[in-house]
Image (cartoon, rainbow, N blue to C red):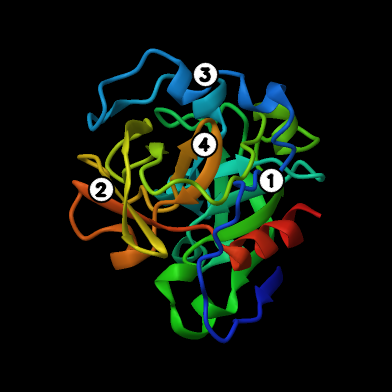
Amino acid sequence: MIQSTLPRTARRTRARRASRILLALAAMPALLGVDLPDAAAASPLGVTAQARPGATADRVGALFAGGLDGGHFCTAAVVHSEGRDVIATAAHCLEDPDTTVFAPGYRDGEAPYGVWKLTGVYIAAGWTDGRDPDDDIAFATVAPADGAPGGAVEDLVGGFPVAVEQPDDARVTVIGYPRTQETPLRCANTTTLLTGTQRRIDCPDLTGGTSGSPWLVGGALAGVLGGYEGGGSVPEVSYSAVLGDEAVELYRQARS
């Protein structure tokens, strides 16, 4: 297993730039305009329901211990990269990367796009050294494993662009897999800042297993469920670390 750790900076400050940075070919409408959660008919804000099958939900998958028989314990999502092989999740979901596999579009015991093994993990030193909740985001590269077709995962399901510098009250859509369910859930709501480095959303029923779920703003990944209290101590309130310079550097390492 190849693993990369980003050195920890002396003190993190939230960099606010005059214009929001959108990474991963944000100028390409093909990535931002296809089956976006916010563009489709959906439940009212703050209501959690099953995520409909389709291009957006299929980019999200469950993380399993060893294989589909090992039970899913976290969520991850495919993000755009040059190698077309990168997923994003919470750092606390990758404690055993050698035995963790990813099943995009998983539903009802079936992995329609196969199972993918992790080939590289990118985690900030702030997490590995001290489990800093502001560093509870990670990226990993994947390759075909059991039942997966050849090629790259992004060629099959597409990949979310990665966005930073979102407004404090951004409208976020979360898609994730509770451990007790075999289909993903979806909830959208307006977010608030808990601190300058942690974002909060009020959505019911996002229980254990939804850690690592993508937080989507306008179809781009702007965070993952995790961070403060491991993502939340009650199912009605969830958190994500605000994507900062260290997360951007991890993403650049993984995607290249």
Residue topped by disc 4: 60
Q: Residue at the spot x=43%, y=28% of the render? A: 107
Q: Residue at the spot x=49%, y=29% of the render? A: 110
Mark 1: amino acid: Leu
Foreground mark, 4 or 1, reads 1
Mark 3: amino acid: Gly
Mark 1 / mark 3, whichever is N-terminal: 1
Residue topped by disc 1: 23
Residue 222 image offset from top left, x and y in percent: 51, 46
Mark 3 / mark 4, whichever is N-terminal: 3
Label 3: which secondary element: loop
What is the distance, in whole Å, between disc 2 and disc 1 at their CAs? 30 Å
Residue 101 image offset from top left, x and y in percent: 57, 51
Per the rendering, the mark at residue 54 is 3
Mark 2 / mark 3, whichever is N-terminal: 3
Label pair 2/3, CB-CB below 8 angstroms: no
Q: Residues within 10 Å of mark 4 (few under 14, many from 20)?
A: many
Label pair 4/1, CB-CB below 8 angstroms: no
